[in-house]
Image (cartoon, coloured by chain):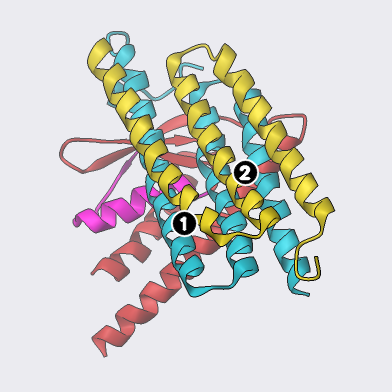
């Protein structure tokens, strides 16, 4: 563990991200409109990207860096797809 | 010295994502919530990607990190825009969008 | 000479964008973490004089990233942008700020 980041930093970062995930999930459960839920899902995608990045530092494998590229594209397409569906349904 | 910079960047990124989550719970209406959930997570991802690519220090990782940052910064305003468009079309009968001055709150 | 000037303006614009980005995030973090909210939300229609599509993309993207403003919609003839403002003061001050950003973008895209 000569070369790595100290374990305390990783645990603090993980706990911050976990708190963010819980708060976003609360908004996802009780959002008054569907659009609040879509915004919360967008935020959850960002939180998951942060989790994967911090985890790749923890186990010291750079191959995990591919996953956030995919998540950033997929979450955008999902958001636009659900919004377009809502627009056509209510419009 | 390197480790201090990397740790600071990662903690700051996680902190900004946490700020976005608190904001999405605390704000009162959808538009203010979108303010919180557009700006802060993009900046948090930016900081975390910067820290992690400094940690691995390989050319391919820098390239992938650049792609992540460009995708996130191009798509976050578009996602907010599409959410707002679908929100307003639902109540189009009450007030036309481009004439409305005061927010409905 | 013209190319050199354009490169200079582009670099200046990138620095300006990054400064605004960091400033916006600290504004919103301070606003969220203090118990009393200082927000005064309002909608504004601002006229744009930019012609090119790249300029409009840069302008709306920068508006979404600057402190307290977010671009929402554009009129079909590309003359007006609807903006949601989080810290509203008066029309004149905000319009002067928006026009300064538009001048910067106009110098980059030509």
Query: Which type of secondary structure does the marked residue at label 1 adopt?
Result: helix
The circle on residue C6 is none
Question: Per the image, is B68 magenta?
Answer: no
**Of residues C35 and A1, the one drawn nearer to the viewer in this rendering:** A1
Rendered position, A20 above or below C53: above
**Of residues B44 and C78, the one drawn nearer to the viewer in this rendering:** B44
| Residue depicted at x 46% and y 16% | B104
Chain letter for the yellow part: A
Residue A35, given in percent of the width and then of the height, sits at 43, 20
Give the side of residue B86 with respect to residue B47, left or right: left
| Residue depicted at x 27% and y 8% | B93
Quarter of the image where one finds residue A86: top left
Chain under numbered label 1: B
Quarter of the image where one finds residue B85: top left
Which region shows up in magenta? C45-66
The circle on residue B69 is 1
Query: Most extreme residue toward the bottom, as rendered?
Result: C1
Residue C44, given in percent of the width and then of the height, sits at 40, 34
Is the residue marked by circle 2 packed among few (<14), some (14-19), or many (20+) residues within 10 Å? Answer: some
């Amino acid at each position: 563990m000569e070369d790595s980041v100290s374990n305390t930093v990783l645990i603090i970062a993980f706990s911050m991200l976990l708190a963010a995930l819980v708060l976003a999930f609360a908004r996802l459960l009780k959002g008054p409109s569907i659009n609040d839920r879509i915004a919360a899902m967008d935020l959850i995608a960002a939180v998951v990207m942060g989790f994967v990045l911090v985890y790749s530092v923890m186990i010291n494998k750079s191959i995990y860096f591919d996953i956030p590229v995919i998540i950033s594209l997929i979450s955008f397409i999902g958001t636009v797809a659900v919004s377009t569906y809502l627009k056509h349904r209510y419009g | 010295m390197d480790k201090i910079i990397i740790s600071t960047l990662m903690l700051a990124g996680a902190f900004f994502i946490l700020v976005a989550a608190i904001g999405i719970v605390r704000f009162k209406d959808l538009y203010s919530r979108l303010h919180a959930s557009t700006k802060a997570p993009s900046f948090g991802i930016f900081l975390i990607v910067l820290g992690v690519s400094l940690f691995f220090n390989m050319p391919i990782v820098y390239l992938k990190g650049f792609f992540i940052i460009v995708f996130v910064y191009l798509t976050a305003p578009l996602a907010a825009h599409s959410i707002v468009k679908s929100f307003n079309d639902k109540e189009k009968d009450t007030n036309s969008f481009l004439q409305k001055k005061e927010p409905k709150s | 000479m013209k190319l050199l000037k354009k490169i200079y303006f582009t670099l200046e614009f990138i620095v300006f964008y990054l400064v605004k980005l960091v400033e916006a995030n600290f504004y919103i973090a301070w606003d969220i973490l203090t118990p009393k909210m200082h927000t005064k939300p309002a909608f504004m229609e601002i006229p744009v004089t930019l012609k090119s599509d790249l300029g409009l993309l840069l302008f709306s993207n920068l508006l979404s990233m600057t402190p307290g403003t977010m671009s929402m919609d554009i009129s079909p003839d590309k003359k007006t942008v609807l903006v949601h403002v989080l810290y509203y003061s008066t029309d004149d001050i905000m319009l002067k700020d928006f026009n300064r950003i538009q001048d910067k973008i106009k110098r980059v895209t030509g």
